Amino acid sequence: MVLHNPMVLSDKRILITGASAGIGRACAILLSQLGAKVVINGRHLESLKDTLQQMSGGGHSIAVFDMANTDELCEWFKSLSQAEGYFDGFVHCAGIQVTKPIRLFDQAFFDETMHVNLASAMAITKGFRLKRDRNKQGAIVFVASIAGLIGQTGNTLYGASKAGLMSLTRGLSMELLRDNIRVNCVAPALVDTEMVQRTKNSMTEAQFQHMLDQHPMGMGQPEDVANAVAFLLSDAAKWINAVTLPVEGGYLAN
């Protein structure tokens, strides 16, 4: 008897944005191990080459593009689909995080954060939904943050952008039902990535330790988030839609 594993992704092609490092890189590695054909995106070619070298199997490729170019994103995705083939799903990890208190707020800070973290998600989804085979279920996973569910000093605008991404998940999940596309989201807490190291460098040791102490299970690893992403992309989650899944080591229960 052959057992069916709904987590296997061997018949799927997946795009991962922000795959140069951190959670995006971990997703690329894991999805390749699960058999997916993965196209990795980021702004820096050399970093993407490093990711590619750590991936398993073949048939993967690199697609350099800056997600900040939202007006060009839809056409870019259409061209990418023509070159690579049909995409079954994508993971949107690209984003920015700058710790800045309200006294330093300005229009440029707002525009950049919302543009990169929220507008890019809408623009790439616009491209993904074009010319879909409705007999094949598509899957989108946005990577948000626990900051969208809580309040954090100096992280208010970032949290607002990620809360917007969660709202976008719910809205798009209904709008794209007719296209047979599921839209879900993960909300990681403190994960050991380059972004968190930059946050640590902007704090005192005591401030960062306070943040760490709020995580009963300690700091997460990128692979912990990648596992949740892989589940939401897979057929194991084929009846799960519009969900934001916290991946937070007990943070919300603390």
Image (cartoon, rainbow, N blue to C red):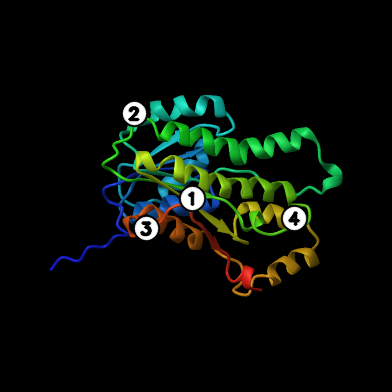
What separation in Å lies between label 3 and label 2 (alpha carbons)? 28 Å
Q: Which residue is mark 1?
A: 25
Q: Residues within 10 Å of mark 2 (few under 14, many from 20)?
A: few
The image shows residue 229 at horizontal and vertical percentages of: 45, 55
Q: In the rendering, which numbered label is found on residue 50?
A: none
* Closer to viewer: mark 1 or mark 3: 3
Quarter holding the N terminus is bottom left
What separation in Å lies between label 2 and label 1 (alpha carbons)? 22 Å
Q: Which residue is mark 2?
A: 83
Q: Residue placed at 51% from the left, 48% from the top?
A: 170
The answer to which of 37 and 49 lies nearer the viewer is: 37
* Closer to viewer: mark 4 or mark 3: 3
Q: In the image, is residue 203 above or below residue 141?
A: below
Callout 1 touching callout 3 (CB < 8 Å)? no
Which kind of residue does numbered mark 1 sit on? Answer: Arg
Q: Residues within 10 Å of mark 3 (few under 14, many from 20)?
A: some
> As drawn, which residue projects farthest toward the left?
1
Which kind of residue does numbered mark 4 sit on? Answer: Asn
What separation in Å lies between label 4 and label 3 (alpha carbons)? 38 Å
> As drawn, which residue projects farthest toward the right?
103
What separation in Å lies between label 1 and label 4 (alpha carbons)? 22 Å
Q: In the rendering, which numbered label is found on residue 201?
A: 4
Looking at the rendered structure, the secondary structure element under dot 1 is helix
Q: Residue placed at 52% from the left, 24% from the top?
A: 72
Q: In the rendering, which numbered label is found on residue 237?
A: 3
231 sits to left or right of 149: left
Callout 4 touching callout 3 (CB < 8 Å)? no
